[in-house]
Image: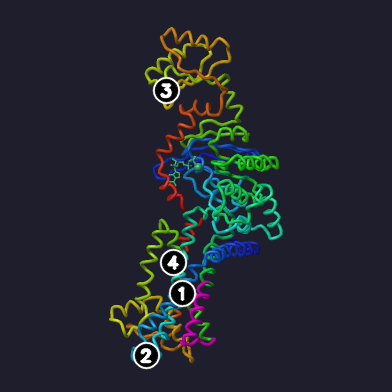
Amino acid sequence: MEITKNNFIFLYQETAALTKRLFIQLKRRPSTFFAGILQPIIWLFLFGALFANAPKDFLPGVDSYGNFLGAGLIVFTAFSGALNSGLPLMFDREFGFLNRLLVAPLASRLSIVLSSFFYITILSFVQSLAIMFISFLLGYGFPNFYGLGIVFATLILLVLFVTSISLCLAFVLPGHIELIALIFVVNLPLLFASTALAPISFMPSWLGWIASFNPLTFAIEPIRIAYSANFNLDLIAFNAPYGDLTCRNCISLLFLLTILSLVIIRPLLNKKLT
Amino acid sequence: MNQIQIKNLSKNYLDVKALKKININIAEGSLFGILGPNGAGKTTLLRTLATLISPDEGTIKINNIDVIKEPRKIRELIGYVAQEIALDKILTGRELLDFQADLYHIDQSNKLERIELLINQLDMQNWIDRKCGTYSGGMKRRIDLAAGLLHLPKVLILDEPTVGLDIESRNIIWGLLHDLKKDGMTIILSSHYLDEIDKLADTVVIINDGKIIDQGNPTQLKSKFGGDRIILKVREFSDSLESEKVKKILEKIDGISQIVINASQGYSLNFIADRDKDLITKLKVELAFSKFKIFSLSQSQPSLDDVYLQATGKTLQDAEIYMTGKRDLKKESKQSMR
Ligand SMILES: Nc1ncnc2c1ncn2[C@@H]1O[C@H](COP(=O)(O)OP(=O)(O)OP(=O)(O)O)[C@@H](O)[C@H]1O
Ligand SMILES: [Mg+2]
């Protein structure tokens, strides 16, 4: 694409239209949106109850399991949303609606990808805020302003990373059945193999190794620490078997992964979209 | 002046040769019909024109712009209405048009005006604000056509726009195409309906099995026959041996030409007979002499179907039935997914 003022306005116009379509769909079919909020809240209740009678100092640094769990659930919600972001695209492919986009003189077909990014990012922000608010009502605290910034920065990176993979899969896999199957297989195991539900110190060493390479962990730990009053980026986020990682380390790693995934999917999207 | 030039166009899908060295020129402002049975390659040809498929060989130019090299410029010029209508069930018709207008970068002030105009032209006022998921086949066709026309394309490409439609929707679409053509738009239209092409098109190509069989204007093509079309049966279900014998007899009669045996209609004999009062009598005498009875004999003006039959030995309808059995539609739709 040539970078001209017109092209830029066109890119904006088409991206806005594509994003708007996704939001209209959401508005008229909001069930998955609410399910996305409800599910983590149910977990919060149930897991909180499950460990209600655990000894006071059972988890280092927090008063209750609910406190510990919040960060994991926020990340899980954003992660699931992003993982599913390829589905609308897959349906567009299957129903031929994508052809409508492909015969249009789009300034750049990147707008198809951008609109998904915007949509999922906003969606997961709203969902996360809802979860944070409810967990606040349950007495699990709320991050300060700085902490909140870190929460959202971390979520954006994770969402970009996962969305780009999901969009890629939506082009590569043969149909929505396969995509849903893959999402199904990946979703929960990745959650369990992260520090969402338990700290690394609770895990056998093999799982600890896996968890400390899991991108979800890189997102969960900074957010967990963002909840503490005296947050700063150089606090140790978690003790990986290969050494201690600070929040800064975690976020940088996440950033790196995101860039890497964007670089890797670019040629594929180019091929599929020209 | 030829606005569209298609040269040596070929396209294969794995083992299927869908287009075989197609050459077509289309004049600006004309209504160009593509006629052919199922699986002839019509959609493949139109999708290539619409920049959705890249050909294996050959070139296409529209307004001297290369379709393969500069697809974005081409996309601005053309409106494409696909054979399968893909609407978003959740959007209303108006929202869909609005969406489409933004994809074509129509500015805000023109947008509403264009949308209103098309709603009126295609008579969609009563249901335009309902969700697309509730539309009937005819409504879907109309909204899809409106979407293709929003940006006032120079060339409109329609893949079987009236297939399966009720009379009302069909007439509305025909009327609009007529008006668009009057305004100078070039229209390319594929169809299996002979009457549709006959009525609308200035020029028609007949394609079969990826090849062009014949092209010209409909009257020209039909007048090539210079006589009446006759279908003769000596028995309700004859066989090839018998028909060949009858064919030999017919060949000897002056004024009978272009004899084709149509195997799928009980080996009936199709031929053209000069407009000569005595010819049929002569025919009857000759057949009686060789001890053949006449089971049926029908006489009609030649139609485009005859052009087709003459070239392939099959009627359009039979070719259709034959192809339908051969295709794996599921597999095709999987493969045409992008
Ligand atoms: N995606 C595909 N993969 C494999 N073969 C295909 C594909 N699309 C079309 N074909 C084959 O190419 C040939 C031409 O198909 P095409 O869809 O262009 O025909 P058509 O004239 O549009 O038929 P119809 O009247 O049924 O729409 C057929 O033999 C068909 O089976
Ligand atoms: Mg077709």
Mark 3 chain: B
The reply to whether residue B104 is visible in this rendering is: no
Q: Nearer the viewer, residue A187 or B208?
A: A187
Q: Write down the residue under mark 2.
A: A60
Asked whether B195 or B103 is in front, the reply is B195
Q: Position of residue B37 (x, y in %)?
A: 49, 36
Q: Which residue is mark 1?
A: A38
Q: CA distance from mark 3 to mark 2?
A: 91 Å
Residue at figure coordinates x 37%, y 73% from the top left: A190
Query: For the residue marked with disc 4, what is the amino acid?
Result: Ile
A144 within the magenta span: yes
The circle on residue B267 is 3
Mark found first going from the N terminus, 4 or 2:
2
Q: Position of residue A73 (x, y in %)?
A: 43, 78
Q: Reply above or below: B59 against B290.
A: below
**Tags 3 and 2 both on a single chain:** no
Q: Are marks 4 and 1 in contact (CB under 8 Å)?
A: no
Mark 4 or 2: in front is 2
